[in-house]
Each structure stands twice: as C-alpha cells, then as structure tokens.
Image (cartoon, rainbow, N blue to C red):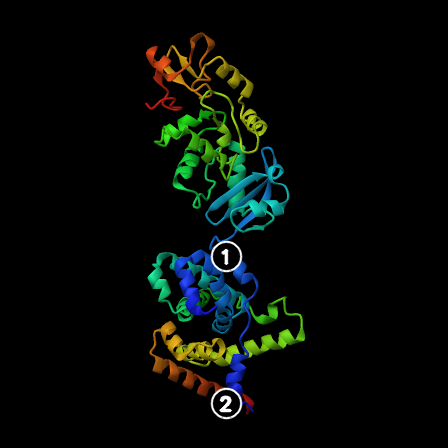
Amino acid sequence: MTLDTLTERLASNRDGAFPDLVRSFQDGIYSGALQFTRNRSDAEDVTQDTFVRAYRALGTYDPERIRDLQLRPWLWTIALNRCRNLLRSRARHPEDPPVDEHRDRSIDTATEATANADLAMWRVRLAFLSGPQRTAVVLHHVVGLTYEEISQATGRSQSTSRSDVRRGLARLRTIIAEEEQ
Amino acid sequence: MSRPDDLTENLASLRRSAPKTVLDDVLRRTDFVDEYAVVEGPTGPAYVAWNGRGVTAFVPVDAVGEAGDFERRHPRTAIPTDTPPARLEKHLEQTLHTGRLGRLPIDLSSIGEFQRKVLEKCAEIPPGEIRPYGWIAREIGNPGAVRAVGTALGRNPVPVLIPCHRVVRTDGKIGNYAYGSPMKRSLLQREGIDPDEIEALAGRGIRLIGSDTTGIYCYPTCRHARGISDAHRVEFRSEADAETAGFRPCKVCRPAAA
C-alpha cells in the first residue's frame, strides 16, 4: 500500500484506514522518540499520543485536506511537539526519576543489553548537538525522512535542514574522535 | 575508527520496532475497540463492554453464551479485561443497585437519532414504575411511532441499565422482552412490581388510577398512584374517561400530554 492510497483511504473512511496509519508509521515515530526522550516508556508515550492526536485532528479535517496531507512530516510535527512538551514537563518535575534502560525488566539477553547500551551511548552523544541539529540528524539518519519532509515537520527551510544534518554529523564525528583519544 | 560511513550506518542501526502494545493502546484510546468484562448483573453474570465514551453493551451471559459468542455479536471489536475501570465500575454498581442511570455514561454515539431519543426517554422511567410504549412515542414527539418504539427498545444495547423492561404494552400486558418475557417479569418483581397484579388490572380494562381527593389520575405504578388509599381510589379505562370525570393527568407520570 502506498502512502497516496493511505491518504485517500483516510479521506474517504477515517476509521477504516486509521489502524493502517498506525501500523505504517509507529516504528519510525518510536525510533525517533527513543532518541528525543530519555527512555522507552517516554518514547512509547510519545508514539501513542502522536497517533491519538492525529486521529482527533483527522476528525476535524475535511476530505480534501486529508488527501493533501504529507503523512510522515505531518505526524512528525505532532510527535516533535509531544517530545518537547514531555521534556519540558520533565524539566519542571525533576523528582520524576529519569528512568534508564538498565531498569527495564524486559532486558534479559546479552544482545538486547548491548543494543540498549548502544541506544544510551548515542543519546549521550546526540545530547551535545543543538536542538535543530539533533532533530534533523535523527529524522534523516535514524527515521529516514527526506530533507523536504524534515523541513515540513520542523518548519525550517530545506536548505537549513540540510545544513543542520551536515553540521550535526560533523559535530558527532568530533565527539566520537574525542572519545577515542 | 569511526569512518564517515560508519557514522550514518550506526545511526541507521538505532531504528527499533515499536512495542506491540502501541497499536492496541492507541486503538483503545481512540475508542476504536471496546473492552469488556463479566460483572454480576441482577439476573446473574453479564457481559459489560465499554470504551472511553461509556458503556456500549450489557448482556446476560446466559443469553449469549461463551465470550467468543459475545465478541462475535458485539458490533465493534471487543477485548476481554478483568474488570471495568474503577470509576466506571463504581457507577455501574450504583446503577445496578438503584435502578437509575445516575452518572453512568452510556455510549449511544453509534445509534440513530430516533432510537437514541427512545432510549434516553426510557432511562427516565424510575425503578418500580412502568410506562406503555405509547407513552415514550408521545413524549418524544412521535405519538404515531408506537411500533417503532417497540423495535428501538428491542434493540437496546444496554438492557437493565436503560430499563426497557419498564416499558409495557399499551393494553397493560407486560409484553415481550429481548431476553424473554420471564426475565422481564423477574426484573420488574425485583423492583417491587407484581406483574400478575398489573396484568389482572389490565385484564379488567383498567389502565389508569385516580384520587378523588386530588382529582389527578396516574399510571397505576406511578409513585403518586401507589399512595392513594382504597377509599379514594378511582379506576379509569382511558384518559378520556378520566377527563370526562373531571380529573387531570399527573404531572409526574404524564399519562396524557398535560
């Protein structure tokens, strides 16, 4: 199923097509949210909230508007907003424990533990980037958005998004080089 | 050792699959699916289904059978759960206990306007009282739609909670019930109504009761009619009879448009 058919189906029958919208985009949203938030449970919350909000929004759009939607960047506009709100409320309530992967009881295999240590390490590295650079790098290289889609999701121009990614990558290389010294 | 290509490869490897719970939780939160549980109802265990808007079904287990049968006949996807959310459970218990809807939310959003009006009107009938189908038809502004009212009540997705058992035939007979006439009679008995007495009265052609001290006439089960002492009790066969005798309709049970 192509994304064009999905928007068409959403426009003509929101409820019938909505579960497929979730299936098509949940992995991408979750993967990005894992980098933008601090742990799996936050990432899962962001992913859920994104689709719940998308569903409500679709209910207020007329079919023409739904047909014109660029689904991936549209969902990311919502998801980035959710991530920002979550981090803001976390900052305001520092007593909430910053749950870490190590506390996740589902980690029981060595492979999984390594994979999670990996996630944690990259999260630390990405934290050194500026907000827009981190967003652009994750959306482009982890999630797979095009520069055009990043630009639609963030409201920054395409060329700015491109240079956000380029500078972000450069910064990451420096950080990694420093780690290895 | 991180060469440029490694960097982007490493970033791409950070992609993960969303937990399997995401889809289910999203569908639940957008009220796409209902949840259901078995609770103790007035005539034994009952399936109760709900979503974020309220209760969507209430069916005696005996009437449906296995959980799988309930899921199949439920108009939406229903996922089994142990118990309803605490708040819903509290209001549900309250409703089952008092016989009044109270603050229990019922999701009638997928029901047509006529049927919704019928069910909402039916929910106003207090426990221990009964009204004829024609009363609902008149009260919702469709006096001719008596049969349609019967059909609408027959498809009540939440019987007992919305008390369609309190609606009887215009001739005073207890009438049909989606889960059988015996269950209707037993539900009424639990509320202190004697169905045999009601039918005996109807058998004599009596449909209304008045008090000669107030000059007001009521349906026989109206709480105001039940207080009338034998000495002052007047029986009527029809609204016209009562009006001719100089009585006016009760403003509580409204046996005729006041």
Q: Which residue is mark 2?
A: B4
Determine crowd level at label 1: few under 14, some 14-19, many 20+ residues with C-alpha closer than 10 A. some
Q: Is residue B81 above or below residue B219?
A: below
- At 45% from the left and 64% from the top, the residue drawn is A50
The numbered disc on residue B27 is: 1
> Of helix, strand and loop, which one carries label 2?
helix
Q: Quadrant of the C terminus of chain A?
A: bottom right
- x, y (%) of residue A35? 49, 74
Give the amino acid type for the residue marked by disc 1 in the picture: Leu
Q: Nearer the viewer, residue B158 or B233?
A: B158
The numbered disc on residue B85 is: none
Q: Nearer the viewer, residue A49 or B195?
A: B195
> Of helix, strand and loop, which one carries label 1?
helix
Give the amino acid type for the residue marked by disc 2 in the picture: Pro
Q: Earlier in the sequence, mark 2 or mark 1?
A: 2
Distance in Å between CA atoms under marks 2 and 1: 41 Å
Q: Is residue A3 above or below residue B254?
A: below
